[in-house]
């Protein structure tokens, strides 16, 4: 099974590039940029990664990304992850990034975009990897700020596949971002949103009805409402479920309690992703292996999950067809 899962062409639709910052690179960038870290060693960083909930994680996630200052830092962050993912047999990544988290530290949008776009370009040319770009907005900040950043990003709209909504979900419903998402739709951008990770099933409905999203990131709490399950099944809305993330952030107690088997048996369009691999114990292959062990799934289940992901990936039709062929032959 290990060898099958390693060589299986895997696609992840839910990855925060800032959450792929491994402690080793954090130290390297801190040194390069003359930043003093609140940790003495890589082991200290890893020991700090024990979370009680999403907010506990977000505090360290925003602190960790403070080492990202220059174009080369963003390039190295993304390229490092792309290479590791490729070694795990990942062939496509839809990548969220958080411009507001950098702007508020004084890092210009141009710096973030230049580094990430260069890494995407180089990876697509040299690594047999395709990369989708999702500019995410922080739901625990005011909508006005998001609108301002979105307009500031106008020169980059043509490089984006979608906008997203992330950060602290509780008490920050999708409806708070109605104007932003309507504006993104007006300019022809696809929309996705985190919903039903820590927030209630109602937030999934709001994301669908008010933000008109094409994808729900996480969505596991849909199981609290039969009506929401039915809606997601009928529409075949893709859910980007992140199993090891849900364990780390205590959405579930342990992986064997995870509702993934139930989501599949309900006929939902499920995929699996790593979310923030540097913080949650591993990348996409590790997530696959953990699911194989926890749920005893056979090869066909993993083919189905990756077929769903290929169907929904932000890529060209030509690459989608190629990836589908490779999946069939795996
Ligand atoms: N930002 C990075 N990871 C996130 C997650 N799992 N949920 C919400 N916002 C995030
Ligand atoms: Zn996420």
Image (cartoon, rainbow, N blue to C red):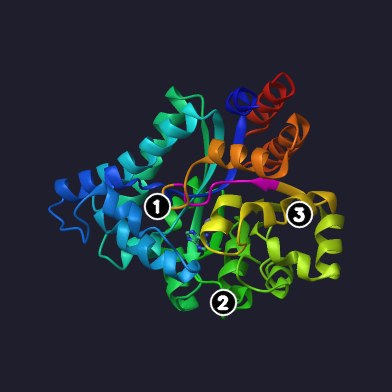
**Whole-percent x, y for residue 319 in the image:** 63, 28
Q: Which span of residues is magenta-colored?
A: 271-277
- Note whether residue 25 is visible: yes
Nearer to me, 198 or 322: 198
The reply, left or right, for residue 71 in relation to residue 81 is: left
Q: Quadrant of residue 195 in the image? A: bottom right
In the rendered structure, the answer to whether residue 284 lies left or right of residue 153 reads right
Alpha-carbon span between mark 1 and mark 2: 21 Å
SS label for mark 2: loop
Query: Does label 2 or label 3 sit earlier along the sequence?
Result: 2
Q: Of the two numbered discs 1 and 3 on the same chain, state the one appearing first in sequence.
A: 1
Residue pointed to by mark 3: 237
Residue ID at (12%, 53%): 34
Q: Quadrant of residue 80?
A: top left
Pointer 2 with pointer 3, Cβ within 8 A: no
Q: Earlier in the sequence, mark 1 or mark 2?
A: 1
| Label 2 sits on residue | 170
Residue 264 image offset from top left, x and y in percent = 79, 49
The percent coordinates of residue 235 (x first, y second) are 83, 56
Which residue is identified by label 1? 18
Determine whether label 1 and label 2 are within 8 Å by CB: no
Q: Is residue 258 above or below residue 312?
A: below
The rendered magenta stretch, by its main secondary structure, is classed as loop
Q: Quadrant of the C terminus?
A: top right
Q: Residue at x 80, y 52 (%)?
A: 268
**Dot 3: element:** loop
* C-alpha span from label 2 to label 3: 22 Å
> Is 179 above or below relative to 271?
below
Q: CA distance from mark 1 to mark 3?
A: 26 Å
Q: Circle 1 — which element?
A: helix
Quadrant in the rendering for residue 177: bottom right
């Amino acid at each position: 099974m290990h060898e099958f899962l390693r060589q299986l062409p895997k696609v992840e639709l839910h990855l925060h590039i800032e959450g792929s910052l491994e402690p080793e690179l954090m130290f390297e960038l801190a040194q390069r940029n003359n930043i003093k870290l609140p940790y003495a060693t890589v082991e200290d960083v890893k020991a700090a990664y024990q979370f009680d909930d999403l907010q506990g994680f977000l505090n360290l996630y925003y602190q960790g990304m403070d080492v990202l200052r220059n174009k080369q830092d963003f390039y190295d962050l993304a390229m490092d992850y792309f290479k590791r993912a490729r070694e795990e047999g990942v062939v496509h990544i839809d990548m969220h990034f958080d411009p507001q988290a950098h702007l508020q530290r004084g890092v210009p949008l141009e710096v973030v975009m230049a580094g990430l776009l260069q890494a995407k370009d180089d990876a697509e040319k040299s690594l047999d990897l395709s990369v989708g770009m999702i500019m995410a907005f922080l739901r625990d900040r005011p909508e006005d700020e998001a609108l301002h950043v979105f307009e500031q990003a106008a020169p980059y709209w043509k490089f984006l596949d979608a906008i997203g909504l992330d950060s602290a979900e509780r008490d920050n419903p999708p409806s708070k971002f109605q104007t932003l998402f309507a504006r993104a739709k007006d300019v022809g951008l696809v929309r996705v949103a985190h919903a039903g990770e820590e927030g209630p099933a109602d937030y999934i409905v709001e994301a669908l009805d008010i933000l008109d999203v094409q994808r729900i990131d996480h969505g596991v709490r849909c199981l609290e409402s039969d009506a929401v399950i039915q809606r997601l099944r009928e529409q075949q809305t893709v859910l980007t479920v992140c199993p090891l993330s849900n364990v780390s952030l205590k959405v579930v107690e342990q992986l064997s309690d995870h509702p993934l088997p139930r989501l599949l048996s309900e006929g939902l369009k499920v995929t699996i992703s790593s979310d923030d691999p540097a913080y949650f114990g591993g990348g996409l292959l590790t997530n696959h292996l953990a699911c194989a062990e926890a749920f005893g799934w056979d090869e066909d289940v993993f083919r189905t999950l990756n077929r769903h992901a290929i169907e929904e990936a932000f890529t060209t039709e030509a690459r989608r067809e190629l990836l589908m062929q490779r999946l069939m032959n795996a």
